[in-house]
Amino acid sequence: MKLLFLACLSPKTGNYTTAERIRSHIESAGHSCELRDVADFHSPSDVAHLVSQNPPFEAALAIHLFKAGRLLLDLRLPFGVIFGGTDINEDVKDEQKRVVMEQVLLKARFAVAFTEKLKEEAEFVLASPDSKIYVQPQGIQTEAAEQFCWTEFLRSSGVRTECLDELRVFLLVCGLRRVKDPLYLADVFSEWHSENLHNVLIIIGPKVDPALTAEVEAVVKRATGVFLAQERSQQELHAAMKRCFAVVNSSVSEGMSAAILEAMDLRVPVLARNIPGNASVVKHGVTGLLFSSPQEFMHQSQRLLSDQELRERVVRNGKLYVEEHHTVKQERETYQRLVDKLHKAQFSA
C-alpha cells in the first residue's frame, strides 16, 4: 500500500524524530510511506491533488490533528491521525480550530494518543467515541555518539571556565518555540549561578521560531550562567545528555516529551515542569522530579545535588520505566496493526 504521511518536520525536533520512526515501522511491514512536511501545503486541495498522482496514494496518516489533520479533509482515502499534544492541550481553546479538529476526528478511521490522559482529554473536548482512540506511548531508542568531545561542546556553547570537570550542567532540550518556554528558568538560574559558578544551564535545540530565538539570544547575552548551544545531531545530543548533571523540561504544554524519556533511557535525572504531559511520565521522586515554579525548580535541583540516594533512585526507576512502557517493538506492532486497518478499509469503502 502507498501511504502519505503528513507531519511538522522542522529538522532535529521531537516531531521529526517521531515521524521518521513511525515511517520506518510502516515500511518494515512492506508498505510504501512518503513523509511530507505540512509546510509544503497551503490547503486540503493541495494534498488532494498530490494523492491523485500516478500511482495514486491509497491511505494517509497525520501527526497533529489541526496542523496536519485539516489537510486531509478533502480526501476520499481512509486515514488515521496521531495527536501531537498541542492540538489537544492548546489548539482546542480556539473554537474555529476545535470545530475543524472534530471534523478530522470524525472522518479518521483511528486516532492515537501518547497517553491515557491525552485520550481522555480528547474524548472530552472533541466529543469523540472511545473506541476510535488508541493509546500508544512513544517508543524510545537512544544512541550516543562515540566521538563526542564534551569540552568542545561546552566551549562552543560559550562556557568559559578552567574547571570544566567541576561544572554541573543542566541541559534544557527543546525547540525554540513559545510552547517550550525556554526562558522560564533563565532569571532564577542566573541568580543561582552568581552564588555558585559551577551550576550552568545550557539550552539546546533547533531555532524554530525566529522571533523567540532573537529573544533567547538577547537574554543569554546578559544572563550569566545561561547559555545557548548550537543544535546537534541526535547522537551528539544523546552524548551531551549523558554528560550533563540533569535534563530539564520547562514546557507550557507537552504531548509526551521524547527528551525526557531519552534522558531516562540514558540514566540521566530529569527535572520537569509539572504539566499533564510531563506528569504522565515523571512520577515525582520516583522516576524524576517535578516543579511548578522557578523557585520550586531551585528547591528540587538542590535536593538532587545533596541527596545521592534520591539521584540514584530516580535514575534507576526512570530507566526501568522506559524499558517497560516505551519499547520500540510495541510501538512498531501497534502502528503496523493500525495501518493494516487502513489497508483493509480501501476494500470496504
Image (spheres, helix red, strand yellow):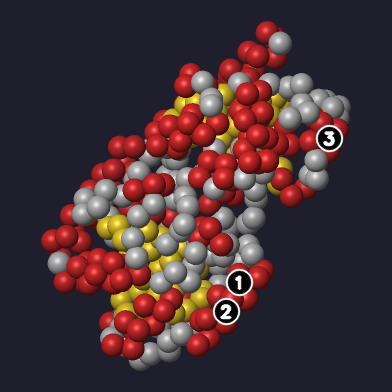
For the residue marked with disc 2, what is the amino acid?
Glu
Q: Is the C terminus in the top left, top right, bottom left or bottom right quadrant? A: top right
Q: In this view, does 54 lie to the left or right of 303?
A: right
Residue farthest top in this picture: 348
Q: What element carries label 3?
A: helix
Residue named by callout 1: 213
**Can the viewer see residue 63?**
yes
Q: In this view, does 333 lie above or below 345?
A: below
Q: In this view, does 299 lie to the left or right of 57?
A: left
- Residue at the image position 62 percent from the left and 30 percent from the top: 102
- Residue at the image position 50 percent from the left and 45 percent from the top: 89
For the residue marked with disc 3, what is the amino acid?
Ser
Q: Looking at the image, is mark 1 or mark 3 earlier in the sequence?
A: 3
Q: Do the residues labelled 1 and 3 touch (CB within 8 Å)?
A: no
Residue farthest front in this picture: 95
Q: Is the N terminus in the top left, top right, bottom left or bottom right quadrant? A: top right
Residue farthest bottom in this picture: 162
Category of crowding for the residue at label 3, using alpha-carbon neighbours closer than 10 angstroms: few (below 14), some (14–19), many (at least 20): some
Category of crowding for the residue at label 1, using alpha-carbon neighbours closer than 10 angstroms: few (below 14), some (14–19), many (at least 20): some
For the residue marked with disc 1, what is the amino acid?
Thr
Residue 217, label in figure: 2
Q: Which quarter of the figure has residue 165?
A: bottom left
Q: Do the residues labelled 3 and 2 touch (CB within 8 Å)?
A: no
Q: Is residue 182 above or below residue 106?
A: below
Residue 45, label in figure: 3
Q: Is residue 280 above or below residue 172?
A: above
Q: How far apart are marks 1 and 2 (CA)?
A: 6 Å
Q: What element carries label 1?
A: helix
Q: Looking at the image, is mark 3 or mark 2 earlier in the sequence?
A: 3
Q: Do the residues labelled 1 and 2 touch (CB within 8 Å)?
A: yes
Residue 254, label in figure: none
Q: Which of 19 and 329 is in front in this view?
A: 19
